[in-house]
Image: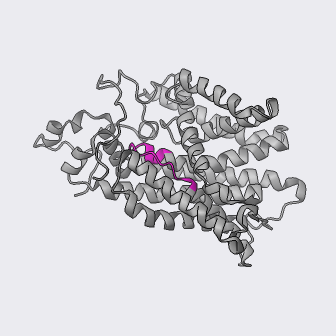
Amino acid sequence: MSVKPGSLGGESGVGEELGVGQDAAFRGDRTDEQALTGATSSPRTSRRGLLAALAILALLVLAPLLGLPSWLVFLFTVAFAKGLVVLGVVLLLRGDLVSFGHGLYYAIGAYAAGLALRAGFPLRDAFPLAVLGALAGAVLASIVGLFLARYRGIFFGMLSTAFSMILYSLLLKLYWLTGGTDGIAVRISSTLGLQPPADLIRLTQYYFVLALAVGSVYLAYRVAASPLGYLMRGINDNEIRVEYMGASVRRAIYRTYVLSGALGGLGGALTAITVGHIAPDLAYWTASGEFVFIALLGGSGSVFAPFVGAGVFELVRNYAQKASPYTWQMLLGSVLLVIILFAPGGLWSVFERLVGRRPTGSAGGPEKRPAKERRWALSSKR
C-alpha cells in the first residue's frame, strides 16, 4: 500500500480515528518549504526565510572573493564536508533514530578515496573520488542497514557505534593497506578537470565542496517533501499507526539509512580531499559523537541546520584552541553548552525567530498541540 501525504485520512474515517488527520506531519496542505523546515509559517515568512537562505548562499559564494582569509576558507570547506555527514544524521533524527556510529561512513568514504589513489587507479580528479566515497558509504549502509532497521532507541545507537568501532579496529590492524595510525596521504591532481595553481587550490576546493553541499541540500529537501520524508516524521510520532496504515516502517528506515550512509561517505571523501590525509581516528567513536553533537547544536528543523552547526562548531573549536591550548576542550564545551541551554531547538531555531517563523516543534501550531517529547523505545526490536 502506498502512502500519500494527502490521502491518509480517507472517507472511511480510519485515518481520523487513528489521529493521523490531526498530525501536522501528514497534512496534505503543507507546502514543500514547510515540509523542509517542519515549521508553521505564513507565505510572507516563508518567502522571507527563502530570501534569507539565498542571501546566506550568496554571501558564502562571494566571501572568498571579498578577502576572506585562506585559513577561514579551509575551515569552512571542512565544515561543509562534515555538514554533509551531519545532514545524514539529521535525516535519521527525523525518525527519532540517533546514530552514534556515522564515523563508519565518514571513514569508509575517506578511505575509499585514499585507497583508490594509493592503488594507482585512474581516478585523480576530485569529482570521481567524491562519487566513489558516496557509493562506498551507500553500499556499506545497505548491508549494515539490514541489521539496524530492526532496532530502535538506545539499541540502534549502540549497534551503530559497534559497527564503527569494528571498522576502526580493522583500519588499525591492516597496516600494510591503511598505514595504521600513520594513515595515508591523499593527493589529487585536478578538480572537475581543472588544474589550478598552488595558490588557488584551497579556493577551488571551497567552491567544489560548496557546490556538492548545495546539491545535497536540495536532495534532502526533496526527500523531506516526499512520501518517504512524511513517513519518517510519522514514525517519529507513532510508528504503530504507520504500520496500521499499511506502510513498511522497516523499509522506510532502511531507505533513509542508505541515503544517510551515502551522505556520510560523500562527506568523508571530501574531507580527505580537502585535508590531504586520512587516519583510523575518522572511524573512532568520538568522531561519531561529534556529528551527533553538531546535529543537536544546529538543530533538526531544516536541512540547512547541519551546516550552520558545523560552521559554528569549527569556528568555536578553532578559537578555543588558540585561546586556551591546554584546556580548550573545557572552553569549547562551555561555549557550546551555553548555546544549547539558551537555544534548545538548536541554532536554526534562532534563525527561525529572526525571520518571523514559529520554531520547529513549538506549541501553538495549527492544531494547538504541544510539542512531542522524544522517548526511547521500550523494546529492542520492532
* Viewer-closest of 307 and 92: 92
Read off the magenta span: 90-103
Q: Is residue 25 above or below residue 215?
A: above
Q: Is residue 60 above or below residue 336?
A: below
Q: Position of residue 177 (x, y in %)?
A: 69, 73
Residue at (57%, 34%) from the top-left corner?
A: 297
With 210 as the anchor, is 98 left or right in this view? left
**Can I make out residue 379 in this image?**
yes
Q: Is residue 239 left or right of residue 36?
A: left
> Is residue 304 visible to the viewer in this orientation of the structure?
no
Considering depth in this image, is 219 or 256 the residue closer to the camera? Answer: 256
Magenta-drawn stretch contains 100: yes
Q: Is residue 370 above or below residue 302?
A: above
The outermost residue toward the left is 12
For the rendered model, the colour scheme is one colour
Q: Main secondary structure of the magenta part?
A: loop
Tell me the residue at 69%/34% (across/down). 329
Where does residue 323 sit, x and y in percent of width and height? 80, 29
* Residue for point 27% across, 56% down: 248
Q: Nearer the viewer, residue 380 or 258?
A: 380
Q: Does 131 sit left or right of 14 as displayed? A: right
Q: Locate residue 372: give its quadrant.
A: top left
Question: Does the segment drawn in magenta span residue 195?
Answer: no
Quadrant that contains the N terminus: bottom left
Expressed as whole percent of the image width and height from the top left, the position of residue 195 reads 83, 65
Q: Quadrant of residue 71?
A: top right
Report how many numbered discs are placed on residues in the image: 0
| Residue positioned 53% across, 30% down in the render | 346
- Residue 305 position, x and y percent, is 55, 38
